[in-house]
Image (spheres, helix red, strand yellow):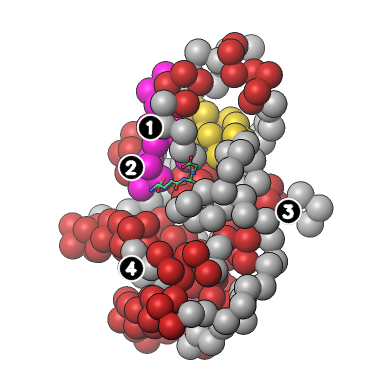
Amino acid sequence: MALHEKALPFDIQPVDLGAKAQHDPDYAAKSLTHRVPTLIHDGFALSESSAIAEYVDEVFPGTALYPADTQNRARARQIQAWIRSDLTPLKQERPTEVVFAGETWPPLSPEAQRAAEKLISAAEFLLPDNAKTLFEQWSIADVDLAVTLNRLIFNGDPVPNHLVTYANEQWQHPSVQLWLKQSSPGN
Amino acid sequence: MSSPSLILYVDSEYFSPYALSAFVALHEKALPFDIQPVDLGAICAVCLCGSA
Ligand SMILES: N[C@@H](CCC(=O)N[C@@H](CS)C(=O)NCC(=O)O)C(=O)O
């Protein structure tokens, strides 16, 4: 895979938030949103995952999260916004427990089936010629698209082979794998 | 020990696809950051995480 991964000094430090909350000056800012993810950078609290990705990309060096090309960058943002705002019946009938906890859910309703078809045709348009990434290089939108495809794939729903290959390869991304170790610590 | 300048709040079950996206974004920058899992305490209406 054409993916760059750097060695990272990184610790997962689970805390009992209930016990710690009152000692954490940042918690008040965070709790206003009541949503995850929320990033706090030197006291600046930011929620909305795509806003977080854009902020992090602008502020820190390292692997680029968005394409350099203006239109590709706009397309990446489009994909992120679309995945977050559409496909609701599919998300309801293929919750992320399918992806992160190995659950299998019943066959899709017609409404969710239509959402699945919309997802698949968009993915086929965006990933011609068995592309391994949406753009020339990996971008954060690949993670979002792969998670969404995996809602179907992990449940055993039919998805074209090359999209399965794409999503599987994206799932091997070291940063994704590190997250998976948290969601199933036994593995 | 100084407090870390980067803290990412995520759901304690690690089921949020949006928390995953933000986690990957930070991790790709090869910076140290702390993870603070939050017990959402209810089913998330957006991604249904917590419905298990
Ligand atoms: N559009 C937001 C969605 C965030 C979101 O829906 N977070 C859910 C977990 S998946 C949450 O915090 N739910 C708890 C609540 O809304 O109270 C993003 O991309 O960050």
Q: Are marks 1 and 2 in contact (CB under 8 Å)?
A: yes
How crowded pointer 2 is (Cα within 10 Å; few <14, some 14-19, many 20+) is rated as: some
Query: Can residue B48 be seen in this snapshot?
Result: yes
Span shown in magenta:
A37-53
Front-most of residues B34 and A80:
A80
Q: Residues within 10 Å of mark 1 (few under 14, many from 20)?
A: some
Disc 4 from disc 3: Cα separation: 30 Å
Marks 1/2: CA–CA distance: 8 Å
Q: Classify mark 4: helix, strand or loop.
A: loop
Instruction: Please tell me the numbered disc located at residue A145.
Output: none
Q: Amino acid at mark 3?
A: Ser
- Where is residue A184 shown, x and y percent of the image? 73, 53
How far apart are the two marked residues, 2 and 3, measured between alpha carbons? 27 Å
What residue appears at the point 79 percent right and 57 percent down from the top-left corner? A187
Q: Which mark is residue A46?
A: 1
**Is residue A60 visible to us here?**
no
**Mark 1 and mark 3: span between their CA atoms?**
27 Å
Residue under label 2, please give it.
Answer: A51
Amino acid beneath label 2: Ala
Residue A184, which numbered label? 3
Residue that appears at 46% across and 18% down = A28
Label 1 and label 2 in one chain: yes
Which disc, if any, is residue A135? 4
Q: CA distance from mark 2 to mark 4?
A: 20 Å
Q: Is mark 2 within 8 Å of ligand 1?
A: yes
User: What amino acid is labelled 1 in the image?
Assistant: Leu
Disc 2: host chain: A
Q: Earlier in the sequence, mark 1 or mark 2?
A: 1
Density class for disc 4 (Cα within 10 Å; few <14, some 14-19, many ≥20) is some
